[in-house]
Amino acid sequence: MNSQILRAALVLGLLSAVGPFAIDMYLPALPAIGLDLGADTAGVQASLMAFMAAIAVCQLFYGPISDMVGRKPPLYFGMALFVAGAVGSALAPSIEWLIAARFLQGIGACAAMALPRAIVRDGYTGADAAQLQSLLMLVFSVSPILAPLGGSLIVQFGNWRAIFWVVAGIGVLGALLVLFFLKETRPPEARLESSIGSALRGYGVLLRDRNFLGLSMIGAFGMASFMAYLANSSFILIDHYGLNPTLYSVMFSINAVSFIGVSQLTGVLTRRFGLNAVVRTAVNGFIVTMLALLVVWLLGVDRLEVLAALLFIGYGFLGLVIPTTAVLALEEHGQIAGTASALMGTLQLVTAAVVMGVVGSFFDGTARPMVIGIAACAVVAFALTRLTIKPVRLVAAAAE
């Protein structure tokens, strides 16, 4: 394997994990935050949705700016805001303060979450890009695997505020990664044609590109299904099933292992069968598994082991969908990779935020609303796949 790809995956994966760490680490503390600040479930979830909303909206600015000035300056600015938001969250005297601080932190985090996709596109396409995206996700997996465990330990031996002091330190480490280990991939000559006007024109081109929009939204509803689980899992697994924060973290990590582990097959499968065939096959597996979960729950089977097993399988298929759709969507837009990556991220996170809000509004203390929401996302992703990607026989050496 190319050592350059491995190094890029390590740096970009760790950088991409900075923002998700700020989500995953405080998930076990959501019930404790509600008790300490006197907030209900909806109020505590609003702190998560504020973070996600900031990431979604502000990507629209970071992407074009990175096309104009390079990838590194926006990353420095984002990391500074991220650290400031973490400190504000640690000092929050009320749920309203926490929501505002999380929004500020989200404005900073979206630079580290959006620009790595553009950096990948700056240097790679096709199967190499798919392999790098999957490796990036492998490094990125440190967040959903370790962050909840770390958060639960902090809550067990300290309090939820200490989580945000740790997150602030992670933001500082992210800035150091950019400074010492990340090369600028957007050379000055490539920036000459980038401007506010070209960014607006670029967004116009992308919004008229049905292939780009379709691929982005397949990934969006796949990601939304995971975010629906993320936003509700702590209340369901801790309050409904009676797990302690540590066991909850283990359960959450198991699904992340499935998602990330299967994603590592992306490079091998796309080289053998082609990107389009891998997407269609993975989406088929995803919808079958999630509809099976829905049927089981509608029949009244409310068992933790059933929920865990089917989510493990379904999110494994999703691990193939996310990196492949991202590569396909950006394939034809190398000149405006930052803008395209930003719009993709915004579409995906806005979709996730809407799904999280809808599922949260029907929360009844059980897993049923979450399961229905996840299944609905799978159905939409399946329909979009059929509309966007032409049927491809899964045969060796398929050229796409």
Image (spheres, rainbow, N blue to C red):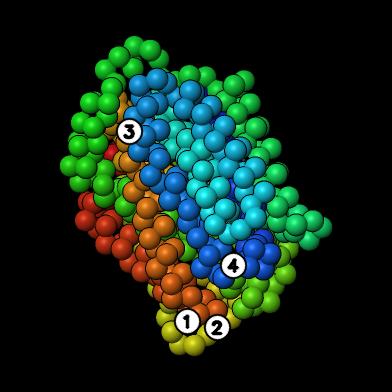
For mark 2, give the secondary structure. Answer: loop
Q: Quadrant of residue 255?
A: bottom right
Residue 75: tell me if it is visible: yes
Above or below, 197 against 149 in this view is above
**Alpha carbon of mark 1 to alpha carbon of mark 3: how far?**
41 Å
> What amino acid is found at the position of numbered circle 3 in the picture?
Thr
* Mark 1 surroundings: few (<14), some (14-19) or many (≥20) residues within 10 A: some
> What amino acid is found at the position of numbered circle 4 in the picture?
Ala
For mark 3, give the secondary structure. Answer: helix
**Alpha carbon of mark 2 to alpha carbon of mark 4: how far?**
28 Å
- State the mark number for residue 302: 2
Name which of mark 2 and mark 3 comes first in the sequence. Answer: 2
> What amino acid is found at the position of numbered circle 2 in the picture?
Asp
Name which of mark 1 and mark 2 comes first in the sequence. Answer: 1
Question: Which residue is identified by label 3?
Answer: 339
Question: Which residue is identified by label 1?
Answer: 297
> What amino acid is found at the position of numbered circle 1 in the picture?
Trp
Please state the horizontal and vertical placement of residue 86, each as a whole percent of the image: 62, 43
Please state the horizontal and vertical placement of residue 267, each as a whole percent of the image: 46, 40
